[in-house]
Amino acid sequence: MKKMPLFALVALVLVACNDSKKSKNPTKTEKDWVILFDGISTDAFRGYGIKEFPQGVWNVENGVLIANPDTANRDLITKKRYKDFELEYEWAVDTAANSGVFFHMQEDLSMESNNGNSPNWLDNFELQVLDDQHFYDTLAVRSAGAVYDLIAPKNKKLKAHWTVQSGQIIA
């Protein structure tokens, strides 16, 4: 069975408000932000169930974080936990790819999906990253931009399909 490329995140940026550095002045709106991926460093991430970044499963190529489709799946999680955050990212997927970004995820190493995928989708919130045009599941609550199986996206406007070839994103 041919493995499907997961997805490439283009400039993944998860910004988290750091509660300890918030101004005590209620009129001040400035916040300190944490950028987790700047196109170079993966220091803010580790693999699900492990303490280090899963090199070879995930790679940084040309400023893009890319999942290697020829390896076993290994989700990335942040080393630090964030309570209040804003999430901003751009993504591109290969043909028929299916992936997502989990938030408020609970790491439960005893859980197994029994299908070769990460167990995270079983009981965590996921923002769906998907090739709507070529993926077989066409339900709106499972389409790109949905909170998987819960909330369908509204006013969705996807850019043209991109292809990932040898670490290069081709429009």
Image: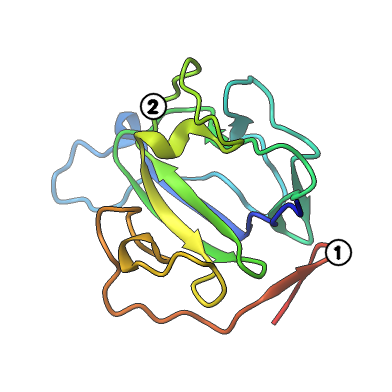
Residue at position x 39%, y 27% in the image: 106
Instruction: Describe residue 109's horizontal placement relative to residue 152 as left or right.
Output: right
Quarter of the figure with residue 57: top right
Pick the residue in front: 98 or 84: 98
Q: Position of residue 38 (x, y in %)?
A: 63, 52
Please say which color scheme the image uses: rainbow
List x then y, in percent, for residue 140.
33, 68
Residue 42: tell me if it is visible: yes
Q: Quadrant of residue 84?
A: top left
Separation (CA) of disc 2 from disc 1 = 33 Å
The image shows residue 92, relative to residue 58, as above or below, that is: below
Q: Quadrant of the C terminus?
A: bottom right
Q: Residues within 10 Å of mark 2 (few under 14, many from 20)?
A: few
Visible residue check, residue 33: no
Q: Type of residue at label 1?
A: Ser
Do the numbered discs 2 and 1 sit on residues whose CB atoms are within 8 Å? no
Considering the numbered disc 2 on the image, is that residue within a helix, a strand or a loop?
loop
From this view, report whether residue 162 is shown above or below residue 127: below
Q: Which residue is mark 2?
A: 106
Residue type highlighted by circle 2: Gln
Q: Where is mark 1, residue-wise?
A: 166
Give the number of marks: 2
Counting from the top left corner in percent of width and height, residue 138 is at: 41, 70
Q: Position of residue 53 (x, y in %)?
A: 69, 31
Q: Residue at x 54, y 68 (%)?
A: 135
Residue extending farthest right: 166
Q: Residue at x 60, y 48 (%)?
A: 37
Give the secondary structure at mark 1.
loop
